[in-house]
Image (cartoon, rainbow, N blue to C red):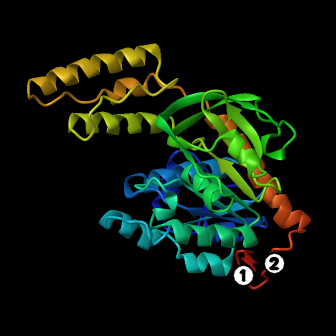
Amino acid sequence: MPLVAHTPLPTFQRLKQEGQTVLTGDYALRQDIRAMHIGLLNMMPDAALAATERQFFRLVGESNQIAQFYLHPFTLDALERGPKGREHVQRFYEPWEKIQEEGLDALIITGANVTQVDLSLEPFWEPLIEVIDWAYENVTSTLCSCLATHAVMQFRYGQTRRPLGFKRWGVYPHRVVDRAHPLVAGVNTRFDVPHSRFNEISREQFEAAGLKVLVESEEAGVHLAVSEDQFRIVFFQGHPEYDIISLLKEYKREVRRYAEGGRPDYPPIVQNYFTLKGEAILEEYRELLNCALARGETPSEFPEGLLIEQLDNTWHDTAEAVINNWIGNVYQSTHIDRKKPFRDEVDPQDPLGRRHGA
């Protein structure tokens, strides 16, 4: 069933304009359909805050048609934000204390930009541990994306991510290696996933921690894994939530950094993402930009419009299918089986039918 716009968060209106079904809170309350409450701990920087909301909200809204989805975005006070980011959070995000008090059925934790080699030195380290420890005891399943996966592997399983020595940047073919797991039921056995990272957790590290690898790539490594109980924590190392233009935007930012002297080398082409025609356009632009810089002239505009026409999305359908399976299994655990000892029953006094955590 659809997303429920229970707050004035602009993302709801944006998704509605894209064609998604988004109900108002009043209308949703009149429907005799179970509500599911999913938290989104958004740790992305200000420039990517709203885009990350849309990406994960979209995946949830396109998934299992069995419930009305209430999305609850929140963030960590320890994350540094500018005026616009602070305003967005203050107006539209929920306090962490409210999340704890009212509970969730499931939780998604995004990646984050980091400045330290050791994640434990990041200012958000202790607050993030608090959230994940709470979720482990009170939430049916937590889905960790990229940096969140690396953080959980370090503090809960003692497996520290390892630098690649370069940026893993592109769209890579993957293969399902455990076809019996419910998260990959009905999913293509081979599919693409975008990656964008400088570090990784290897298959050997996941297995040393007693975890189960479900999907991996010969070139990009593990993408999908699960905790020892098979579901309480779900690990993404790639970015299946990315829009078709997400990697293009990243590449454009790096080219701009080069042009402004922020990086010494011209960024390498994003792998397996651009068509041959797109790569030719980029090579031509690189030559024009370097000539302009050598002459002290202002470079021409990055050819974003021409490149967008050449892009293909080869990962979204599979991402939607995996999220669909995840949501479906959360629903069965919390609303049908009701065998999870760490979940309370639905509070009859709560008009949204929200389940309160222990």
Quarter of the figure with residue 232: bottom right
Residue 286 in the figure: left or right of residue 44: left
* Crowd class of label 2 (few under 14; some 14 to 19; many from 20; radius 10 Å): some
Horizontal and vertical percent for residue 180? 87, 39
- Residue at image location 25% in from the left, 41% down from the top: 262
Specify the quadrant of the image occupied by residue 187.
top right
Task: State left or right for residue 62 relative to residue 301.
Answer: right
Q: Earlier in the sequence, mark 1 or mark 2?
A: 2
As displayed, is residue 132 above or below residue 234?
below
Point out the residue furthest to the bottom here.
349
Q: Secondary structure at mark 1?
A: loop
Asked if one can make out residue 213 in the rendered structure from this viewpoint, the answer is yes
Q: Residue at x 30, y 28 (%)?
A: 266
- Disc number for residue 344: 2
User: Residue 305, image x and y in percent?
Assistant: 35, 28
Residue 130 sits in which quadrant? bottom right
Q: Position of residue 143 (x, y in %)?
A: 67, 55
Of 60 and 122, which appears nearest the observer? 122
Q: How many marks?
A: 2
Q: Which residue type carries mark 1?
A: Asp
Circle 2: element type: strand
The quarter of the rendered structure image containing the N terminus is bottom right
The Cα–Cα distance between marks 1 and 2, rounded to whole angstroms, is 13 Å
Residue that numbered label 1 is attached to: 350
Q: Residue at x 40, y 39 (%)?
A: 250
Q: Which mark is residue 203?
A: none
> Closest to the observer: 158 or 107?
158
Single out the residue that lies furthest toward the left: 296
State which quarter of the image contains the C terminus.
Answer: bottom right
Residue 185 % position (x, y):
83, 40
Q: Amino acid at mark 2?
A: Asp
